[in-house]
Amino acid sequence: MRLILGVLTALLLTACTAESPSEPPAPGQTSSQAFQQARVLGKENLSGRVDEVTIESPALGGKGTVWVIRPEGWTEGSTGWPALYLLHGCCASSGDGWLSSGEAERVTAKAKAVVILPDGGRMGWYTDWVNGPAWETFHMKEVRSLVEPMYGVGDRRAIAGLSMGGHGAMSYASRYPGVFQAAASFSGVLDIRSNPPGFSDFLRGSGAEPDDIWGPLPAQEDNWRAHNPTDLVAGLKGLRLYISCGNGDPGPLDSGGSRDGGEASLLTENTNFAKAAEAAGVEVTTDFYGEGTHRWPYWTRALERALPVLMGSSG
């Protein structure tokens, strides 16, 4: 009997050790999610240099999608490639906007980098929600650990995005020091604390509850500040930075139309970011180009203009 009890005790201790994660769960994860492992479910070539990678994501509680544009000269097994992450904006039914509407494959054709376009959710906001999916964990842990080795990515990375994606690009670049060497934002949401009531109304009108994303104000203001690019700008010092935004008036890439109040308000946020950068001694290339609305033609042009900054000496 003593022998049986000893064996059972040893088995119980072994089971407890195996089921206990060695590190605390990442923000936005439960212990069970942290212990599970993300894995690649499949890779499909869509056309030419473009692949679609499907990931089983504990952070999202389901499947996540990543699109990858392979660079010219890339071969299976090659290594040391720089990566360019492109983040999409909000409210779209699919995260492949840079491919379907932004001409990313054409614009980056000569860039010597693996271009990675992760789905960020219709209203994911590139953060681990207080009550919901963990998008930041999906991008910064799962995608990086799975997709980068598949395509031979080395230690050089740049990140850029439009609107919600501009917010994500600057947030990730500042919150993960040393990961990225360059970041760009096009019509980005760069100061979520500049008008919390108005921004919260926008989120609710678009189907997202702000309290579920960063928590209720003022109780969770620290969490809002911890994900606000304008508050985080000092953490971007030393990176190559580029921001652009229009003033909302119909411009040369519009076919008439009326004034875009949303783009005009984003110009205020971008100005706030630029002023905060100057005060912190952070160098930023700005392109406040005047007339222009919140539309793809301007973001495609912005990516073309920002590419030399993003790639630096890499292409």
Image (cartoon, rainbow, N blue to C red):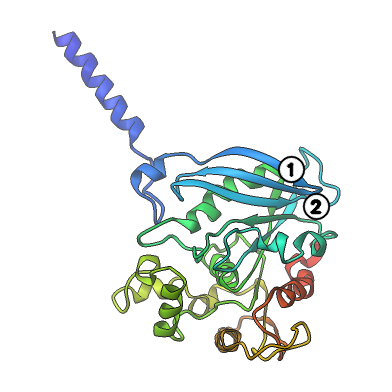
What x and y, as percent, mark residue 246? 67, 86
What x and y, as percent, mark residue 204? 41, 73
**Viewed as shown, does residue 189 lie left or right of 9?**
right
> Could you tell me which residue is drawn at 65 percent across and 47 percent down?
148
Q: Pick whichever, 260 or 58, lies toward us.
A: 260
What x and y, as percent, mark residue 108? 79, 61
The residue wearing badge 1 is 45
Residue 276 in sight here: no
Quarter of the view holding residue 11: top left
**Viewed as shown, does residue 219 lie left or right of 129?**
left
Quarter of the view holding residue 300: bottom right
Tag shown at residue 71: 2
Asked if residue 244 is positioned above or below residue 312 in the image, the reply reads: below
Q: Secondary structure at mark 1?
A: strand
> Could you tell me which residue is drawn at 78 percent across and 75 percent down?
305
What x and y, as percent, mark residue 139? 55, 55
